Image (spheres, rainbow, N blue to C red):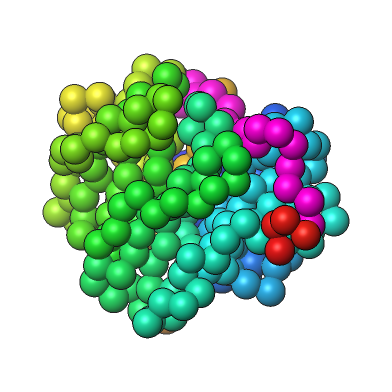
Amino acid sequence: MTEAEALRPDRLELGEGIRWTDRGIVLVDILAGRLLTATGSPTDPLRQLVRLPVPLGAVAPVAGAPGSWMAAAGTGMCLLPPDGTARWLARPEAGAARPMRMNDGTADPHGRFWAGSMAYDAEEGRGSLYRVDHDGTVTRVLDGITVPNGPAFTADGGTMYLADSARGVVRRYAVDPATGALGTPEPFVTFDDGSPDGMVVDVQGAVWVAVWGTGTVRRYGPDGRLDRTVCLPARQPAGVCLQEDVLHVTTARVGLTTPGPHDGALFSVRVDVPGRPADAYRHRGGLPSPREAS
């Protein structure tokens, strides 16, 4: 087992969606609607890039648009230009029977953006997975999920891993590179302890999983076998990314009646298998205008 350390002073309510991008490390504090970046010295406070009046689940950089992000936020998907004013593509969960919000999300190697939704009270089966295609169209591709986390993609974009955290399972899907259509799911890993949360795939095709409630991040080979465990002095790991050979882990204080001193911290640890930068969302034909995206 390997132990990680927290050097920055920040303690987030629900730190998640951490990504190594061409603009550095970014992460979110979901319920506070904050997009943050880890810059400067490893001991410096996180710097806020954007704050939204709605929950912010995750972002991906937008190719060819410096300072712009595709975001899973509130009840849908929006573009965040450098001024931080949300330009909505769609809000498919706005009319849901139960209060809903977007959760984790990421771009795939083909430039599409994927993100999940969940009920605020995590009601069974209320969540969905959405895909934003290159033209900005938002499509529901899976439903009946309770708390979706990830997804995470292999480097060729041919395989997607998606956690249903409340049900303690990570599933694997084949992805059609031309259309983004998903194949039949197959179980990848089932958890008897804790809940699988954020994930990232390394250059060897292994999957690193933050396991909420256990204080661990676990690496599973492509065959689903546990390879190693990283231990944290925080109970609720929520997001992971690999910045070359440094594993970064976000954690959360939400739901803890007596948070410990490291709950909600950002942790880092050196590992021996690197990752690659997060993929960007690629919009064909230029970004929508504010009128088109309203």
Q: In the picture, which quadrant includes the C terminus?
A: bottom right
User: Residue 148 at what x, y percent from top left?
Assistant: 35, 56
**Which residues are the magenta region?**
271-290
Vertical side of 19 occupied by 196: above or below: below
Q: Residue at x 73, y 48 (%)?
A: 288
Residue 225 quadrant: top left
Would you say 98 lies left or right of 245 here?
Answer: left
Of the pair 227 and 92, the residue shown nearer to us = 92
Would you say 294 lies left or right of 75 here?
Answer: right
Residue 286 quadrant: top right
Would you say 180 lies left or right of 36 here?
Answer: left
Q: Residue at x 65, y 36 (%)?
A: 283
Is residue 275 at all visible to an observer of this figure? yes
User: Residue 68 at what x, y percent from top left?
Assistant: 75, 45
Q: Is residue 74 magenta?
A: no
Of the pair 42 and 82, the residue shown nearer to us = 82
Of the pair 170 and 99, the residue shown nearer to us = 99
Q: Residue furthest right?
A: 83
Q: Residue at x 79, y 43 (%)?
A: 67
